[in-house]
Image: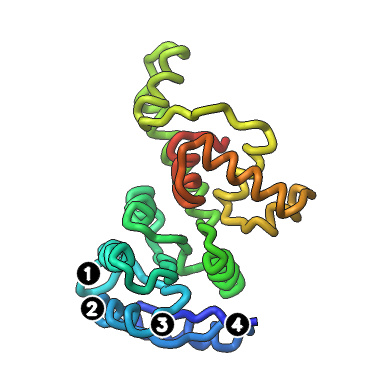
Amino acid sequence: MSKIRVILIEDHDLTRVGIRAALQQREGFEVVGDARDAKSGLKLLKSAQPDIAIVDVGLPDMTGIELTQEFKQCQADGESPHTKILIMTLQDSEETVLAAFAAGADSYCMKDASIDKLAQALNVTSEGNAWIDPAIARIVLHQTQKSYVSSTQNVEPTTIAINRITDEDFIPAYPLTERELEVLKLIVDGCSNAQIAEQLYITVGTVKTHVRNILNKLCADDRTQVAVRALRTGLIQ
């Protein structure tokens, strides 16, 4: 089984060295390079063409979000088409998280996560799935609900539902089934298809069917968009 090739773009020396050492000691990962600023990181991304780049948000010469946006534009032009971006940061604000995904980040992990959780995030991301730190998912959902309540305190209940959809510019093509909502919640939690199948006691093939139906119903292109949309619109309670 081939190893997941990883690079680190992180300006904090101790953090960078620590993550590198931890991943090198785990089976299934190969750290093929690291950089301490965005300019060097972009060069490394293009030359090493890793499976995943772990990118810190707070880089000295440009933000990790700006780096992600620039690299994704390079990918649109055909460079390093298979490389995924995992944003890692201590910032847990809704604005930062949504900006990261809007820039094209594939996954989002907190810096205080354990090495086991980081390894899980890397494995899920390498499979082509989005991984969102559960702490981030809860924070975004909480902030979305607070904002919604604040903006609709004096509105009739029937109007609330309409405004909620209009504000997000989102109307589901068809309502989700109870099972699809269960699958959606696990997608938001960053679970892979195999993990969803194990938790719901269904086959991976059935999970793939549910995921495809969810993508179609929510008019989404990928799991990242589905997860962000579910949090923004409060589909997951």
Between the C-alphas of marks 2 and 3, the distance is: 16 Å
Between marks 2 and 3 in the image, the one whose residue lies nearer the viewer = 2
Secondary structure type for disc 2: helix
Upstream in sequence: badge 1 or badge 3? 3
Which is nearer the eye, 112 or 197?
Answer: 197
Secondary structure type for disc 4: loop
| Horizontal side of residue 113 vs 100, given as left or right | right
According to the picture, the residue beneath numbered tag 4 turns out to be: 2
According to the picture, the residue beneath numbered tag 1 turns out to be: 62
Q: Are marks 2 and 1 in contact (CB under 8 Å)?
A: yes
Which amino acid type is marked by label 2? Lys
Q: Are marks 4 and 1 in contact (CB under 8 Å)?
A: no
| Label 4 neighbour load within 10 Å: few <14, some 14-19, many 20+ | few
Residue 16 disc label: 3
Quadrant (top left/top right/bottom left/bottom right) for the N terminus: bottom right
Write the residue at 46% across / 43% down.
220
Q: Are marks 4 and 3 in contact (CB under 8 Å)?
A: no
Between the C-alphas of marks 2 and 1, the distance is: 8 Å
Whether residue 142 is visible to the viewer of this picture, yes or no, is no
Q: Are marks 4 and 2 in contact (CB under 8 Å)?
A: no
Q: How was the colour assigned to the protein in this rendering? A: rainbow
Between the C-alphas of marks 4 and 1, the distance is: 33 Å
Quadrant (top left/top right/bottom left/bottom right) for the C terminus: top right
Write the residue at 27% across / 63% down.
73
Residue 39 disc label: 2
